Amino acid sequence: MRHYELLFILKPTLTEEEAKARLEFVKDIITKNGGEIASVVEMGTRKLAYTIKKYERGTYFVIYYKAPPSLLNELTRVIRITEDIIRFLSVKYENKREIAAWENLSKGIRQSLKKEVREPRAPREPKVEVAEAASEE
């Protein structure tokens, strides 16, 4: 199994539910063809660097996954015919240094997502020391 990263941009006109459905669709393609998803990053809607298919904004997603090389052709084919995905980029991590970076990225993302799920701590009250001035009468 090889290590991959898939970034894709959805049309900004999709509702939040439709965007989640497209994300699940892509995740299903990966898992049904023998891939293992390590982590998913939802980057939200951002301004594009240039206009793509008359859109100036897009909803970004990044998926880190392991898969056999045959999956990449099928994934590329399906993404190209999906009209709601306006742009995508697939990156293969090959040497040991890149794979170590991939593992650190996916592990770091999973840990940061776990931290977000926890309830935030209540802020501490700052310690205020009041110095009493000696009054002279």
Image (spheres, rainbow, N blue to C red):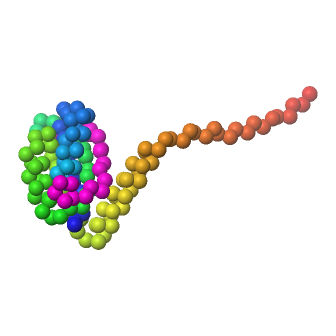
Instruction: Please tell me in which quadrant of the rendered image residue 50 appears.
Output: top left
Residue 97 appears in the picture as rendered? yes
Residue at image location 68% in from the left, 40% down from the top: 127
126 is higher (above) or lower (below) than 69? above
Residue at image location 33% in from the left, 67% down from the top: 100
In the image, the segment drawn in magenta is 31-52
Q: Nearer the viewer, residue 21 or 81?
A: 21
Q: Residue furthest top?
A: 137
Q: Looking at the rendering, in which quadrant would you find the N terminus?
A: bottom left
Predominant secondary structure in magenta? strand
Q: Residue furthest bottom?
A: 96
Residue 94 position within the rendered picture, expressed as x and y whole percent measured from the top left: 23, 68
Q: Nearer the viewer, residue 19 or 10?
A: 19
Residue 58 appears in the picture as rendered? no
Residue 129 position within the rendered picture, expressed as x and y whole percent measured from the top left: 73, 39
Instruction: Please tell me in which quadrant of the rendered image residue 42 appears.
Output: top left
Classify residue 134 as left or right of residue 65.
right
Residue 25 within the segment the image draws in magenta? no
Q: Nearer the viewer, residue 54 or 20?
A: 20
Q: Residue furthest right?
A: 137
Instruction: Please tell me in which quadrant of the rendered image residue 69 appears.
Output: bottom left
Q: Nearer the viewer, residue 86 or 26?
A: 26
Classify residue 129 as left or right of residue 16.
right
Residue at image location 8% in from the left, 52% down from the top: 77
Residue at image location 34% in from the left, 58% down from the top: 105
Residue 22 position within the rendered picture, expressed as x and y whole percent measured from the top left: 19, 42
Residue 47 within the segment the image draws in magenta? yes
Classify residue 116 as left or right of residue 45.
right
18 is higher (above) or lower (below) than 7? above
Residue 29 position within the rendered picture, expressed as x and y whole percent measured from the top left: 17, 51
Q: Looking at the rendering, in which quadrant would you find the C terminus?
A: top right
